[in-house]
């Protein structure tokens, strides 16, 4: 009778050990399979959405990410930057963002989902140069009443802190706002909005 108990115990142990080893083996098989379903570097460059972590972004700062081979800027605007936007309308070519350079949900004064966070493609709409970020509201050689924004050194185009283009510069359109959505308070998915790629 004691021999039967020992055999039963051994069988249970061997069954449990085999189950654990099998589960670990399945895990090792699944990891490469699941990894292969993630977009490759080539796919990301071709347009797969990218994430931007804004958890450490301070007011007045900008971070850059790459999406579809283009620089994308994410700027955390200060209260002063936002307050200056309405006063610039008379100086802007398209203050109401009539031209479709942004998704419908960003067709507002701030050109953003959240007023303080601006997401722009960092390419001038004139000839494709990359404007510089000039956030300080101090006189500049190109604008003595500068309220902060973006200046393209190639041909002198200027954009305000919403990416709206000034009158009298070569750039014909506002800077592009790419499709994007918030995954969480501190994470933005650029290249996808409302479930559409």
Image (tube, rainbow, N blue to C red):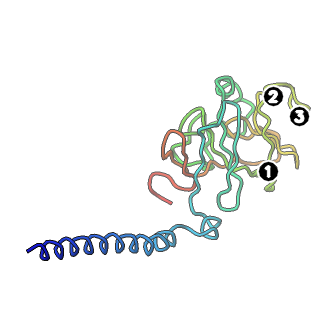
As measured in the structure, the alpha-carbon distance from the residue carrying label 2 to the one carrying label 3 is 8 Å
- The disc label shown at residue 142, or none: 3
The percent coordinates of residue 44 (x first, y second) are 61, 64
User: As displayed, is residue 109 above or below residue 123?
Assistant: above
Residue sitting at x 68%, y 56%: 66
Return the disc, 2 or 1, that comes first in the chain's sequence.
Answer: 1
Report whether 68 appears left or right of 136.
Answer: left
Residue 115, by quadrant, is top right
Mark 2 = which residue? Answer: 146
Instruction: Decide which of 84, 184 is in the foreground and name it.
Output: 184
- The disc label shown at residue 173, or none: none
**Badge 2: residue crowd in 10 Å (few <14, some 14–19, many ≥20):** some
User: As displayed, is residue 190 above or below residue 25?
Assistant: above
Which secondary structure, mark 3?
loop
Residue sitting at x 30%, y 72%: 19
Mark 1 = which residue? Answer: 130
Q: Check whether the beta carbons of the residues at disc 2 and disc 3 lie within 8 A of each other.
A: yes
Instruction: Decide which of 90, 120 is in the foreground and name it.
Output: 120
Which secondary structure, mark 1?
loop
Residue 59, by quadrant, is top right
The percent coordinates of residue 12 (x first, y second) are 21, 71
The N terminus sits in image quarter: bottom left
Q: Check whether the beta carbons of the residues at disc 1 and disc 3 lie within 8 A of each other.
A: no
Task: Return the residue found at the far front.
Answer: 2
User: As displayed, is residue 137 above or below residue 118?
Assistant: above
As measured in the structure, the alpha-carbon distance from the residue carrying label 2 to the one carrying label 1 is 19 Å
User: As displayed, is residue 148 above or below residue 131?
Assistant: above
Is label 1 or label 3 in front?
1
**Badge 3: residue crowd in 10 Å (few <14, some 14–19, many ≥20):** few
Return the disc, 1 or 3, that comes first in the chain's sequence.
Answer: 1
Which secondary structure, mark 2?
loop
Residue sitting at x 52%, y 55%: 192
């Amino acid at each position: 009778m004691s021999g039967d108990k020992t055999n039963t115990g051994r069988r249970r142990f061997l069954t449990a050990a085999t189950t654990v080893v099998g589960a670990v083996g399945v895990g090792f098989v699944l990891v490469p399979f699941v990894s292969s379903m993630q977009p490759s570097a080539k796919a990301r460059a071709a347009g797969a959405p990218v994430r931007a972590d804004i958890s450490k972004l301070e007011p007045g700062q900008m971070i850059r990410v790459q999406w579809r081979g283009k620089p994308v800027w994410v700027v955390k605007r200060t209260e002063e930057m936002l307050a200056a936007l309405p006063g610039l309308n008379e100086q802007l070519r398209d203050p109401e963002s009539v031209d479709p350079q942004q998704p419908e949900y960003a067709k507002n004064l701030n050109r953003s989902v959240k007023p303080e966070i601006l997401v722009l493609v960092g390419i001038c709409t004139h000839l494709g140069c990359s404007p510089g970020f000039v956030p300080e509201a101090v006189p500049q050689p190109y604008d003595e009443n500068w309220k902060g924004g973006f200046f393209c050194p190639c041909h002198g185009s200027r954009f305000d802190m919403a990416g709206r283009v000034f009158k009298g510069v070569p750039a014909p359109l506002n800077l592009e706002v790419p499709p994007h959505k918030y995954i969480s308070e501190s994470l933005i998915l650029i290249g996808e909005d409302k479930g559409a790629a």
